[in-house]
Image: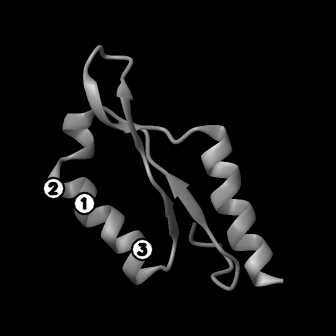
């Protein structure tokens, strides 16, 4: 990311266990990406996770990722 052209949008999509997702460091690091670097977060979803827990932290669906990226890129034109 040190070589990223910050004139171009950068997206990130988290995927992790709910305990990891709700950890204070995740919030701090996500805020840094958004507020300091201007990255665009693709929100997680709540569902049954691989670990067997139900909660927030699952990767967004492919259609959600496409929709967010497509909408942002089309606005830039």
Assign a secondary structure to mark 1.
helix
Instruction: Give the residue displayed 34% in from the left and 73% down from the top.
Output: 32
Tally of marks: 3
Q: Nearer the viewer, residue 6 or 11?
A: 11
Q: Nearer the viewer, residue 32 or 71?
A: 71
Assign a secondary structure to mark 3.
helix
Q: Nearer the viewer, residue 75 or 57?
A: 75
The spot of residue 4 in percent (x, y) is: 65, 73
* Tag 2 residue: 24
| Whole-number angstrom distance, CA of label 3 to CA of label 2 | 15 Å
Q: Is residue 32 above or below residue 64?
A: below
The spot of residue 25 in percent (x, y) is: 20, 56
**On-image quarter of the N terminus:** bottom right
Q: Residues within 10 Å of mark 1 (few under 14, many from 20)?
A: few
In the drawing, what numbered circle is on residue 3? Answer: none
Q: Residue furthest top?
A: 52
| Whole-number angstrom distance, CA of label 3 to CA of label 1 | 11 Å
The spot of residue 46 in percent (x, y) is: 36, 36
Instruction: Give the residue displayed 70% in from the left and 51% down from the top.
Output: 66
Q: Are marks 3 and 1 in contact (CB under 8 Å)?
A: no
Instruction: Give the residue displayed 58% in from the left and 62% down from the top.
Output: 11
Instruction: Give the residue displayed 43% in from the left and 39% down from the top.
Output: 15
Q: Is residue 39 above or below residue 46?
A: below
Q: Are marks 2 and 1 in contact (CB under 8 Å)?
A: yes
Q: Residue furthest right?
A: 77
Q: Is residue 50 left or right of residue 68?
A: left
| Mark toward the start of the polypeptide (3 vs 2) | 2
In the drawing, what numbered circle is on residue 27? Answer: 1
Give the quarter of the image for residue 10.
bottom right
Q: Residues within 10 Å of mark 3 (few under 14, many from 20)?
A: some
């Amino acid at each position: 990311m040190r070589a990223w052209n910050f004139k171009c949008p950068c997206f990130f999509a988290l995927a992790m266990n709910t305990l990891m997702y709700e950890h204070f460091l995740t919030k701090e690091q996500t805020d840094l990406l958004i507020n300091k670097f201007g990255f665009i977060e693709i929100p997680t979803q709540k569902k049954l996770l691989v670990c067997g827990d139900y909660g927030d932290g699952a990767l967004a669906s492919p259609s959600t990722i496409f929709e967010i990226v497509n909408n942002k890129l089309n606005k830039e034109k």
